[in-house]
Amino acid sequence: MTKREEITLGELQERIKGTIESSFSRRYWVRAETGEVKIHSQGHCYIDLIEKAQGSGGVTAKIQAVIWASSFRMLRPYFETTTGRALERGLSILVNVQVTYSQLYGMSLVITDIDPTFTIGEQEIIRQRSIQRLTQEGMFEINSSLEIPLLPRRLAVISSEGAAGFRDFTKHLEENDFGFSFSIKLFPAPMQGESAPDGIIEQMERVACEMDNFDLLLILRGGGAAQDLVCFDDYNLAINIAQFPLPVVFAVGHDHDYHIADMVAHTSLKTPTAAAAFIIDLFVAEEQQLIFLSRRVSLSLQSRLQSETNSLERFNERMTVALRTRYREVEHLLDIYERRVISASPFAILERGYSLALKGGKKIGSIKDAQVGDDFTLLLSDGSFNCKINSIRDGKKR
Amino acid sequence: MAKKDSLTYKQALAQLEELVVRIENPETDLENIAEEVKKALDLVKFCRDQIKGFREETDKLLN
């Protein structure tokens, strides 16, 4: 029996470490996907690097990697400003690594450098491909061609339950300064990560089933890391939003990124609070329109009344003038009648001391009108005499 | 004169016109001319009063 070689665990690991580190002494640029990413309180960043099988998506390779705090302090802002995303789960990355082995923690990779342009490239290629396909399918115009009701007050919201974004939205709506009231129904769904698109689509289908109860669908998420939002570039989510029967307002709390979901939605806003403000603004605009109209009604009524009053005054004036003329005319007529009566009546002459001889009611104007012995009446201003003709003298023969 | 109370302005004016013509007509009997002249002048007064009343009434309504 040969003598067994016994070594301590530490010695074995010492040998493994030596073998590994001498075999992998140089650095490698490695393409991988990020799994779990943890940032340690001391500033070190621990990342699970994984590789997935094409098609099935099953994990085929996995190793733990670390970016020491001293490197991470520089790499993190470099990565984030270049990609516009946090270094988080689900990213395709290209990293420069050194293989290390620790007796306590086993094998791991120390990341010394990272090429953010690779990450941009991968995601951008997928994204551009989706955009191209959606353009060909005419998906960008569909939802935005739906009309938002004048006063959308029945709101279906897809968001994660208890998330700050949904709370902000509800609070902002309910505490509006104008006293508008809204009915909000939450359809909870995961709002980040790989499961988000399917979860959101499932809830969209539920909203669609009772679409008559809603005026708008809002998809909300408050803030969060940029990388979390990559799910909103998902092609399936995009076609579901585009073809949704209600107008979709999309607000996932992003500052610089514009996702495919933003492009296909009816209205895209930066934050859930902005979405609430958008809805309140619709009500305010409508109310202002009403105030404006009622003001117009009262103004036009006033001017109408004024013009009616004016024309009444004109009628009044015309009537006054017409009446005055009429009265003057009839008074003038009466004056004429009066003058005619006075001048035709014999009494003016009688008043002046003359008398008038009447025979059988007729004036005796000539000696031929009567004979000796005839009775006649002599009319004076204050009465009459009954007279008899004693003799006749012809005035012309005198 | 009781008859005049129920007289309208138009009727009064027509009577007046008739009287004026009668008074002016030399064929008209002079026996009753005094009465006719008096009646005509009464009618003139009646019509003037009527007009005065109309005027007061319309002035009150229009102001």
Image: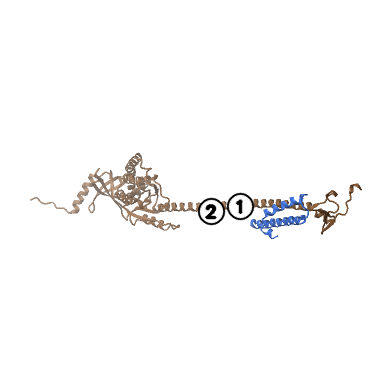
Chain colours: A brown, B blue
User: As shown in the figure, which amino acid type bears the numbered disc 2?
Assistant: Ser
For disc 1, the marked residue is A312
Whether residue A329 appears in this view of the structure is yes
Chain for disc number 1: A
Q: Quadrant of the N terminus of chain B?
A: bottom right
Residue A395 percent across, percent down from the top left: 89, 49
Secondary structure found at label 2:
helix
On the rendered structure, is A331 left or right of A346?
left
Question: Local crowd at mark 2 within 10 Å, few (<14), some, or many (≥20)?
Answer: few
Task: Evaluate if marks 1 and 2 touch, with contact meaning CB atoms under 8 Å apart.
Answer: no
Residue B63 in the image: above or below residue A239? below
Please name the residue shown 78% across and 55% down the image.
B31
Q: Quadrant of the C terminus of chain B?
A: bottom right
Hey, which residue is sitting farthest right in the picture?
A398
* Quarter of image, res A233: top left
* 1 or 2: mark nearer the eye: 1
Whether residue A336 appears in this view of the structure is no
For disc 2, the marked residue is A298
Q: Nearer the viewer, residue A355 or A214?
A: A355
Q: Nearer the viewer, residue A118 or B50?
A: B50
On the rendered structure, is A246 left or right of A319?
left
